[in-house]
Amino acid sequence: MTEKRPFDVLNGSLDNMVLIGMKGGREIRGKMTSYDVHMNIVLENTEILENGEVKRKVGTMLLRGDSVIFISPSE
């Protein structure tokens, strides 16, 4: 089995829905359209979640990489 590097996982997430955990406990879901070497992430069709439910829809969003705790595939 080939080991995956972090950028391999990010590349595999491009153009897919992801769930992102942020510092402070906020969770954000959206379609990941791009990222950079600092793990700044651009999401489209973004939703801010609270207790697993959509609290607000915000469209396109740029997330600062040093605020990201985790990235997970989402539906």
Image: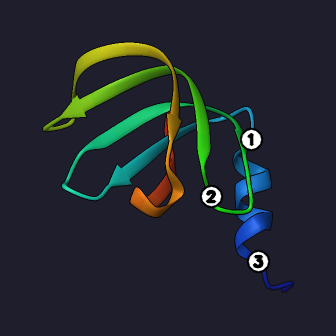
Q: Is residue 19 above or below residue 2?
A: above
Q: Mark 3 points at which residue?
A: 5
Q: In this view, does 54 lie above or below 43?
A: above
Residue at the (79%, 53%) spot, across then down: 11
Q: Marks 3 and 1, how far apart in space?
A: 15 Å
Locate the N terminus and report the quarter of the image it occupies: bottom right
Tell me which label, 3 or 1, sits earlier in the chain: 3
Where does the image place residue 26, in percent across and percent down from the top left? 24, 45
Work out whether residue 69 can be spotted: no
Where does the image place residue 73, in percent across and percent down from the top left? 54, 47
Q: Mark 1 points at which residue?
A: 14
Say what amino acid the circle numbered 3 marks.
Arg
Q: Name the residue under label 2.
A: 39
Question: Which residue sits furthest right?
Answer: 2
Residue at the (25%, 31%) spot, across then down: 49
Contact, CB < 8 Å: mark 3 with mark 1?
no
